[in-house]
Image: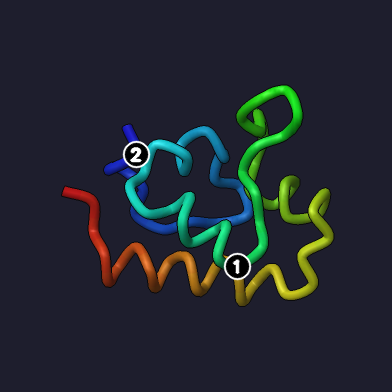
Amino acid sequence: MAQDIEEVTRGTLVERLVDTPGVLTYCIRNGVSLFSCSGGYPCSLGRLLDARKVPDQDAFIAGLNAFLRDNPPE
């Protein structure tokens, strides 16, 4: 379940993130879509960030973790 995510890493499955409140908004505001043309992205966050050519992936993940700490799912 999405609430079980303690810390997001490159290995975190995208499908777990999609179900976490606020994550889609955070990603879109930072220029990263968690969806592909066939639906949800079925792999790790690291692989998605590579495919999306996100330049500072560590900063993106650190920001996402900070967002989740400041906005814990209910």
Q: Position of residue 72 (x, y in %)?
A: 23, 59
Residues under numbered marks 2 and 1 in contact, where contact means CB atoms less than 8 Å apart = no
Extreme residue in the top direction = 38
- The residue sitting at 37% across, 54% down in the picture is 22
Q: What SS does tag 2 mark?
A: helix
Disc nearest the viewer among 2 and 1: 1
In the rendered view, tell whether residue 51 sits above or below residue 30.
above
Q: What SS does tag 1 mark?
A: loop
- Amino acid found under the numbered disc labelled 1: Asn
Q: How is the image coloured?
A: rainbow
User: In this image, 2 relative to 18: left or right?
Assistant: left
- Amino acid found under the numbered disc labelled 2: Ala
- The residue sitting at 43% across, 66% down in the picture is 65
Label 2 or label 1, whichever comes before in sequence order = 2
Q: Position of residue 64 (x, y in %)?
A: 47, 65
Q: Position of residue 50 (x, y in %)?
A: 80, 54
Q: Position of residue 6 (x, y in %)?
A: 34, 54
Q: What separation in Å lies between label 2 and label 1 (alpha carbons)?
A: 20 Å
Q: Which residue is mark 2?
A: 2
Q: Residue 30: give its label.
A: 1
User: In this image, 5 relative to 47: left or right?
Assistant: left
